[in-house]
Image (tube, helix red, strand yellow):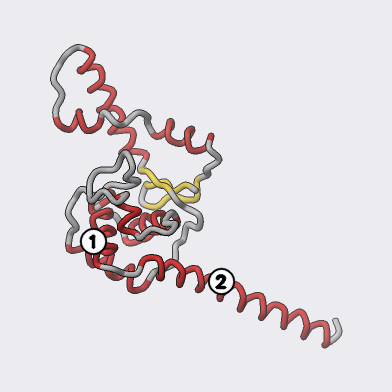
Amino acid sequence: MKPAVVAAVGGASVVGVVALVSGLLAGRGAARGALGGSAADEEAIARMLASENERGSPSLWREIIWTQIRSLGKSSIWQRITAGLGYGPQGGARPVASDKPATAATRAYAARFLAELPPSSLPGARRFFEPAQQDRAFAVAERARAKRARGEPLTAQESRLLAYKSDAAGIRARWASKGHRVVGVVDGVEFWT
């Protein structure tokens, strides 16, 4: 190959790498600007982590936070997590749970995440669920529905879990039918587009 062609191809490669890195950094900058790093955002993240998977690994927590960042639109992370309704269980307008108080560990991770904005390893993930937990909750809900049909009283847990209308296979089928796809699994939690 002629030296001029090698130089042109090499130069184009360098320009491409610079453009790629700039684009990635710009995306993180845009997310940083949307988050703002407010105390309300930090508290919402910490409560979400405590409520969704308190014992999760930093890798799992990072990806859970990114699902919410990718879905922000023009709202703050606090508005996204709480749907503007304040803290509470997942359901209705709330996309994730935030009913449990933050722990020292989830609060520290939320602060570190907002300060560093570590990159996601699951690009495009916007939703997640833990199949084993979903199956357990759905089984309790099915037993509770049968008890209710017999006129038997329900426990507080059974009443709360009545909202579970499908098992893991049902969630996968519903999401796949809407064109979503699995992006990856972290600590037994499935992440979908």
Q: Residue 105 vs residue 84: left or right?
A: left
Q: Position of residue 74 (x, y in %)?
A: 42, 59
Which disc is residue 23 wearing? 2
Query: Which badge, 2 or 1, is on the more N-terminal residue?
Result: 2
Q: CA distance from mark 2 to mark 1?
A: 29 Å
| Residue 110 picture quarter | bottom left
Near mark 2 (Cα within 10 A), the count class, few <14, some 14-19 or many ≥20, is: few
Q: Is residue 21 above or below residue 168?
A: below
Tag 1: amino acid = Glu
Residue at the (31%, 39%) spot, across then down: 91
| Residue 4 picture quarter | bottom right
**Count of labels in the image:** 2
Residue at the (46%, 36%) spot, across then down: 172
Q: Which one is nearer the viewer's eye here, 120 or 68?
A: 68
Q: Residue 178 vs residue 188: left or right?
A: right
Residue that numbered label 1 is attached to: 43
Q: Residue 40 vs residue 152: left or right?
A: right
Q: Which one is nearer the viewer's eye here, 138 or 98?
A: 98
Q: Position of residue 22 (x, y in %)?
A: 56, 76
Q: Position of residue 41 (x, y in %)?
A: 29, 63
Q: Position of residue 11 (x, y in %)?
A: 72, 83
Tag 2: amino acid = Gly
| Residue 43 picture quarter | bottom left
SS at circle 1 = helix
Residue at the (46%, 69%) spot, across then down: 30
